[in-house]
Image: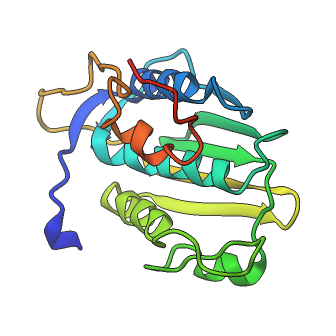
């Protein structure tokens, strides 16, 4: 898989990038019953990252949180923190959580499990891809979960300085401009069918 993906690591303000992504996720979920909130620092944290890949990882985690949380009282919280030159993005939900056995295999390729039915669901690539994206960023993907009490997924990447001055993400554009955008595609299972992205 590594040979099939060429990450574009460029310099940018990750806080600004994440605020843009979160606003678009909020817009996509506003017509659902899910409660979505986010907490992104007001400061500017410039680091090196691939915006397309990182947004893919974040959207996958938000999508998973929606799928395994009761939409009628589901709460999904995205938070970004910076501590000791490490950036951590967490996605927390109050869903069904994962058993130790499921957690053990959660990021394996093609592993899929519906805790309600006990049978596979989906293609089993979401968390595998997330883990791979974090590896490309020299980061980690970790989970804190409890059956019946929800899950917190944590993406952690080191703050890095670019040797180049080029920056792709200083002026981020909206992700959810149409039905082919990444957030819209990954959240299509929970977005009402009559919701039209801008």
For this orientation, the residue located farthest to the front is 194
Residue positioned 63% across, 35% down in the render: 79
Q: Position of residue 159 (x, y in %)?
A: 39, 41
Q: Position of residue 148 (x, y in %)?
A: 88, 62
In the rendered view, tell whether residue 40 sits above or below residue 101: above
- Quadrant housing residue 168: top left
Q: Is residue 138 visible?
A: yes
Q: Is residue 153 above or below residue 179?
A: below
Along the line of sight, the residue nearer the viewer: 73 or 134: 73
Residue 124 spot, x, y in % from top left:
48, 73
In the rendered image, residue 47, in percent from the top left (x then y), is placed at 33, 35
**Which residue is nearer to you in this view: 60 or 167?**
60
Q: Residue at x 36, y 58 (%)?
A: 133
22 versus 198 height, above or below: below
Q: Quadrant of the N terminus?
A: bottom left
Please state if 32 lies on the left or on the right of 26 as rendered.
right
Q: Quadrant of the C terminus?
A: top left
Q: Is residue 24 left or right of residue 10?
A: right
């Amino acid at each position: 898989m590594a040979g099939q993906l060429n990450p574009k690591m460029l310099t940018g303000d990750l806080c600004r990038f994440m605020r843009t992504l979160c606003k678009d996720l909020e817009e996509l979920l506003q017509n659902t019953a899910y409660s979505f909130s986010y907490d992104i620092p007001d400061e500017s944290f410039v680091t090196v990252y691939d915006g397309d890949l990182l947004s893919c990882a974040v959207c996958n985690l938000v999508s998973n949180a929606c799928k395994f949380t009761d939409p009628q009282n589901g709460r999904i919280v995205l938070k970004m923190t910076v501590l000791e030159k490490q950036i951590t993005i967490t996605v927390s939900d109050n869903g069904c959580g994962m058993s130790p056995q499921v957690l053990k295999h959660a990021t394996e390729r093609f592993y899929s499990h519906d805790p309600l039915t006990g049978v596979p669901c989906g293609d089993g690539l979401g968390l595998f891809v997330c883990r791979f994206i974090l590896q490309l960023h020299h980061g980690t993907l970790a989970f804190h979960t409890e059956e019946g009490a929800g899950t917190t997924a944590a993406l952690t990447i080191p703050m890095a300085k670019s040797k180049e001055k080029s920056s792709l993400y200083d002026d981020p554009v909206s992700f959810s401009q149409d039905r082919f955008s990444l957030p819209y595609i990954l959240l299509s299972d929970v977005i009402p069918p009559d919701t039209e992205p801008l």
